[in-house]
Image: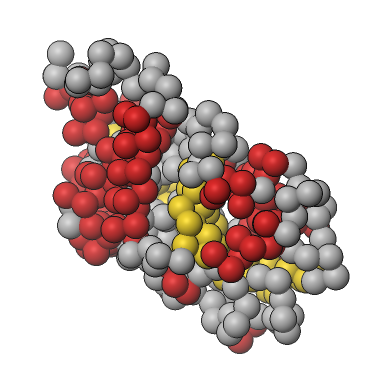
Amino acid sequence: MSMTAVHRVFNFAAGPAVLPVPVLEEIQRDLIALPGVGMSVIEISHRSKTFEAILAQAESDIRTLGGVPANYKVLFLQGGASTQFSMVPMNLLDAGATADYIDCGSWAEKAIKEARKVGTVNVAASTKDANYSRLPRQSELRLTPGAAYLHVTSNNTIEGTEYKSLPETGSVPLVNDTSSDMFSRPIDVARHGLIYAGAQKNMGPAGLTIVIVRDDLLQRSVARKATLPTMLNYAVHAENNSLYNTPSTFAVYALGLVMKWLLQQGGLAGMATVNERKAAKLYAEIDRTGFYRGTAARDDRSLMNITFRLASEELEKRFVKESTAAGLDGLKGHRSVGGMRASIYNAFPEEGIDALVAFMRDFEQKNG
């Protein structure tokens, strides 16, 4: 049965999130047996030539899409971005050194909490007092000379803010949690020491985390081999081509299909054009009359997670109930902040934006 005959709601969930229909159709078609292999991708050994080829192609396409330089390793790991909150300091923060963190959202706050369990952390700037509705400016950063690294969260999924240009760090390596905007727009990998992202928003299904790490930082992991748990050491995963243990094979396969789809969309520049257009339509509606109120500072608005409020919680409850009934799923804001959130990642279709805008106008007419 073709996917086009299946009823699909518009999925505004923050993650696991919408995947491209052509990718889902290809998975569906080949799920029982991969062509020429005679078994499902869910069943094949991670040590097989077939899977090694799937992994190699996925990495190659990541490198092509992101313009990843040769002196960076691409790792396919498990445990989500939350495990990276610990792995980053465990691998990169030497005893006696300090790691700088920008506290710009709920997930950044969690990353800081985990890093403090490992070593010395300096919060270089925080916008918590503004409920993370804006990002710290460069002039606000109080950076540690010779810091082990500076950690930033490029897009704040819960609060709906996104960096338009990354902080300047000088010679200090920049570590970037890009979980909710990775590959939604061009990325300058060479500006980073390490990039990490859970795949389940823009890149594939849940269960896979991508880490892109520069070779000189990997040397810090090499020096810790005797003391760090093996599974938490970047160098071990790099040396074993992400096959030290059984990786999330199905998620790697699906991510590979999404990478191929992204290349067909004109790569990251092509994706950015579409994502900017989608977000602009929605922000224009939020700003049109004042019935809806965007919660993120205008200069810092995210293209991925669009957050807004209505005049009362009662109205917001009605909006969620009626939008869900209208086939617009997942618009309720994160439980920690309330309000509304439309997550419109790479694979979210533009007609879903148009449907939401039409619903918002109708809801305002009835309730305004």
Q: Nearer the viewer, residue 351 or 273?
A: 273
Quarter of the image with the N terminus in it: top left
Q: Nearer the viewer, residue 27 or 313?
A: 27
Specify how the rendered protein is coloured. Answer: secondary structure
Q: Would you place residue 127 above or below residue 241 in this image?
A: below
Would residue 157 be seen by someone viewing this image from the given angle? no
Would residue 182 be seen by someone viewing this image from the given angle? yes
Circle count:
0
Point out residue 197 in the picture as x, y percentages from the top left corner: 49, 50
Q: Would you place residue 152 above or below residue 18 in this image?
A: below
Q: Nearer the viewer, residue 161 or 366?
A: 161
Point out residue 297 in the picture as x, y percentages from the top left corner: 49, 69
User: Residue drawn 73% across and 59% down?
Assistant: 223
User: Residue drawn 53% across and 29% down?
Assistant: 246
Q: Residue furthest right?
A: 96
Point out residue 139 in the picture as x, y percentages from the top left corner: 61, 86
Picture quadrant of residue 134: bottom right
Picture quadrant of residue 56: top left
Please give left or right for residue 256 compared with residue 140 in the image.
left
User: Residue drawn 58% across and 84% down?
Assistant: 170
Point out residue 17 in the picture as x, y percentages from the top left corner: 39, 37
Please give left or right for residue 229 compared with residue 344 in the image.
right
User: Residue drawn 47% across and 74% down?
Assistant: 191
Q: Would you place residue 34 above or below residue 279 in this image?
A: above
Please give left or right for residue 109 compared with residue 120 in the image.
left
Q: Nearer the viewer, residue 234 or 155?
A: 234
